[in-house]
Image: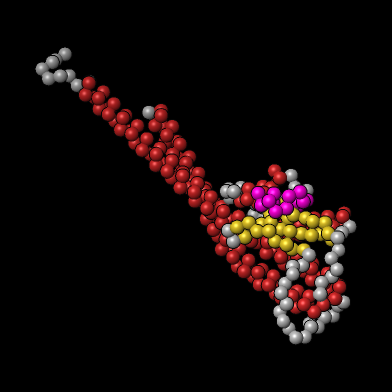
Amino acid sequence: MGRRHDLSTRLASLGEIGDIMTAMKNLAFMETRKLASFLSAQRLAVEAMENAIADFTSFYGRNPQAETREICLLIGSERSFCGDFNVKLARTREEVLPGIPVVAVGNRLANLAPDILIPGANVAEEVEPVLASLVDALEKMQGESGSALGITAIHHEEESVKSRRLLPLPDLPSPGFSHPPLIQLEPFLLYEKLSGHYLYVALHEVLYSSLMEENRHRIDHMENAISRLKERVERLKKRFNMMRQEEIIEEIEVIMLSVDPPGIRR
């Protein structure tokens, strides 16, 4: 009876765990639906910026390349239960940008001992304050070094890990316009402002893309965990039923042994 009671308690606990994991999976799914609209709008903004940059540089050229301090921007997760999400980032960083100072976003990357660690976003609404903290950290690094930053972001996007050059501005093909764009600032100054604006919108896209893939990883991770949990529950239920059957048989045997054989009186 004691062992069956322990199994019953265990089954109840696993049921509660299953409910929690299902809720986590559903929350992650709802977050991906919300992020889809955010990400779509942000990609349009990045595309518009790149078109403007291509138009400008095709006529006015690029500013002379100054000495840069290279930075690896690693976008990880703030929470766990997302499988090998952060492991893939660390592996790609070692392959692509070994030995370069790292600015990491997401406390789950703390084990990499980055030069700067910034708490990441749990939901889409937290991307803005994370971006503000990130920009402050980059400005501080630039001020300390006294030189421009060369920034390469390593992040998840569309089911893969990508390395993306954010600064200096990317080389883009000329749109082929016949006349230069009208500008109100000196080309050198405008190029600098375009760089800042592009970094801002590109970081938005990177953070949203990473959060989207983090939630997709979490959904897959939860689905696998829930599937394994169901298998374990089924095994425990079978064991529980077998133990119950054994107890019933024992009870029947006790009852039968307590019955006097025919023809015998006490």
In the image, what residue occupies the spot 49% across and 49% down? 224
- For this rendering, which residue is in front, 66 or 251? 66
Q: Is residue 137 left or right of residue 22?
A: right
**Residue 65 location, x and y as percent?**
84, 65
Q: Is residue 102 magenta?
A: yes
Q: What is the basis of the colouring in this image?
A: secondary structure
In the image, what residue occupies the spot 66% across and 68% down? 42
Among all residues in the image, which is located at the extreme top? 266
**Residue 246 location, x and y as percent?**
31, 30
Residue 92 in view here: yes
In the image, what residue occupies the spot 67% across and 49% down? 90
Among all residues in the image, which is located at the extreme right? 146
**Residue 218 location, x and y as percent?**
56, 52
Location of the C terminus (image quadrant): top left
Please say if 221 is above or below 248.
below
Among all residues in the image, which is located at the extreme bottom? 178
Please say if 179 is above or below 94.
below
**Residue 245 location, x and y as percent?**
30, 33
Residue extent of the magenta highlight? 91-103
Please say if 135 is above or below 236.
below
Location of the N terminus (image quadrant): top left
- For this rendering, which residue is in front, 63 or 232? 63
The number of callouts visible is 0
Q: Is residue 254 magenta?
A: no
Q: Is residue 13 left or right of residue 188?
A: left
- For this rendering, which residue is in front, 94 or 156? 94
Residue 118 in view here: no
